[in-house]
Amino acid sequence: MVTLCAAPRVAAGLKKTKKYTIIITEQITNKMSEEKEKIRKIIHVDMDAFYASVEQRDRPELRGKPVVVGGPPNSRGVVATCSYEARKYGIHSAMPSSQAFRLCPWAIFVKPRFDVYTNVSKEIREIFYEYTDLVEPLSLDEAYLDVTENKKGILLATEVARQILKKIYQKTRLTASAGVSFNKFLAKIASDINKPKGLTVITPKMAPAFIDRLPIRKFFGVGKVTEKKMAALGIKTGADLKKMKKEELINHFGKVGSFYYNIVRSIDDRPVNPHRIRKSMGEEQTLSKDIDDRQQMLQVLEKIARSLEEHLKKNRIKGRTITLKVKYYDFKQITRSITLEAPVDEADMIMKYVKTLLDKTEAGKKKVRLLGITLSSLLTP
């Protein structure tokens, strides 16, 4: 032990006495403690069917029933979220409300109350800040917390998570699930494993085997298109992904290939960022019926631009990149963008470029079901 761990200049002039051995042991112990301190403790908290759960909390007659929050079934709206009772029938977020109705005709459709959800979200975040200031909200119903050094001095992140879930229920009568791990990737996956009311921990020792068994569709950043592409390469699990060289992944998937290479090896150094910079701001509208009248389209876009201007000025934000989103009657979706030298926040200026972008689409020749405008490359004073 002494020969391996003692530096020559430290050992010089000292004999291998009992005292010397104790000194070296203390140095080793301190070094091990320092290594342990480097391991981050990340919690991902995700509310269970948040919007639907709020509705069931506030309306007792909805409890235990399939509840769909979103557009009515006879509209062209979509499902924002649904209760677990509704999910049993295959209903999920972003599904057309009409399809959700076909899957479960006796489902109860409820119009979203975003003002209520926002207020509840604020109550939940107040609980997070009791434990740490390193809170990164991802949406109204989920957030990352770094509790490596927490305000209450609790040693185990699992205990912090357990307390948070208990307080959320006590304060809001709503349930949440949490994932605890040493990086954001694993914490987020863990929070989804035992929903609802789940608490899952993935330690550094558990991580390799866990990732090897993980279906590729569960990996962060892997959507349906990427999943199909990976399947064509024989990649169905984390173990399959781990066999791929970094150069191969970059060749097939571009820059994100490097990210896949790292996360399958539990490498994710992304910090929990309490000052997350908003990358874009936009709005869209699904039309009550397909239209091919360009003047009517411009009226819809004008309304969206006015609403967007209000939000931009309220948040003192301007954007340099304007993106027009068009979804045709056949659900094919396209975007057209332009990046300006000077940032804008006024509807008239936004519309000036939106008109030009609309000319670069087939809108009018093809009927349109959805229109949207997004500003990105955002700047604040």
Image: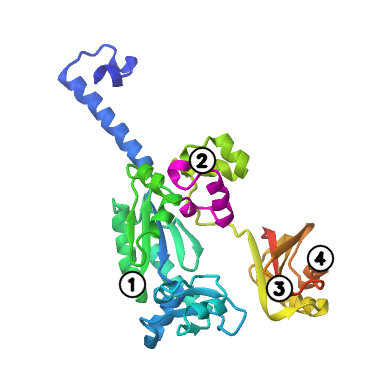
Q: How far apart are the two marked residues, 3 and 2, measured between alpha carbons?
A: 39 Å
Magenta region includes residue 325: no
Q: CA distance from mark 1 to mark 3?
A: 43 Å
Residue to which mark 2 is pinned: 261
Spot occupied by residue 325 in the image (x, y as percentages of width and height): 71, 66
Q: CA distance from mark 4 to mark 1?
A: 48 Å
- Looking at the picture, the colour scheme in use is rainbow
Q: Which residues are magenta?
A: 216-240
Which kind of residue does numbered mark 1 sit on?
A: Tyr
- The amino acid sitting under disc 3 is Tyr
Q: Quadrant of residue 48?
A: bottom left
Q: Are marks 4 and 2 in contact (CB under 8 Å)?
A: no
Residue behind mark 3? 329
Give the mark, 4 or 2, whose residue is nearer the N terminus: 2
Position of 301 compared to 118: left or right? right
Residue type highlighted by circle 2? Tyr
User: What residue sits right under mark 1 in the picture?
Assistant: 169
Determine the residue positioned at 44% across, 45% down: 238
